Image: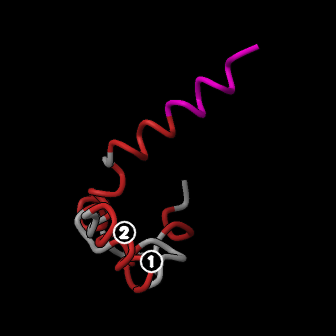
Amino acid sequence: MNINKAVDKAFETQGLKAIADAPVEALSGITAADAQALKSALGISTVRQLGTNKFFLWAQAIVALADQEG
């Protein structure tokens, strides 16, 4: 994976641990308004919190399993 496509330009030289603990705005395409909405709705303020959020993990699992159904 080319991490530079996934993160904002300011984070391209950062290590993965630093990016994981960075604000969600470090991800390419997430605006300050998006970040505020995530924080208000789900208490998510870092990339790590977003990546480990139970609702997002459940959704990923459902989609993966649905793709395996006949």
Q: Residue at x 31, y 61 (%)?
A: 42
The residue indicated by pointer 2 is 38
Q: Residue at x 51, y 38 (%)?
A: 60
Q: Residue at x 32, y 48 (%)?
A: 53
- Please check the rendered image and state whether residue 58 is part of the magenta-colored stretch, yes or no: no
Q: Report the span colored magenta.
A: 61-70
69 to the left or right of 7: right
How would you rate the neighbour count of disc 2 (Cα within 10 Å): few for under 14, some for 14-19, many for 20 or more?
some
Point out which mark residue 11 bears: none
Q: Give x and y (percent) for residue 36.
A: 34, 79
Q: Dots 1 and 2: beta carbons under 8 Å?
A: yes
- Residue type at tag 1: Asp
- Please check the rendered image and state whether residue 65 is part of the magenta-colored stretch, yes or no: yes
User: 10 or 30, which is in the foreground?
Assistant: 30
The residue indicated by pointer 1 is 34
Q: Residue at x 29, y 74 (%)?
A: 23
Mark 1 secondary-structure assignment: helix
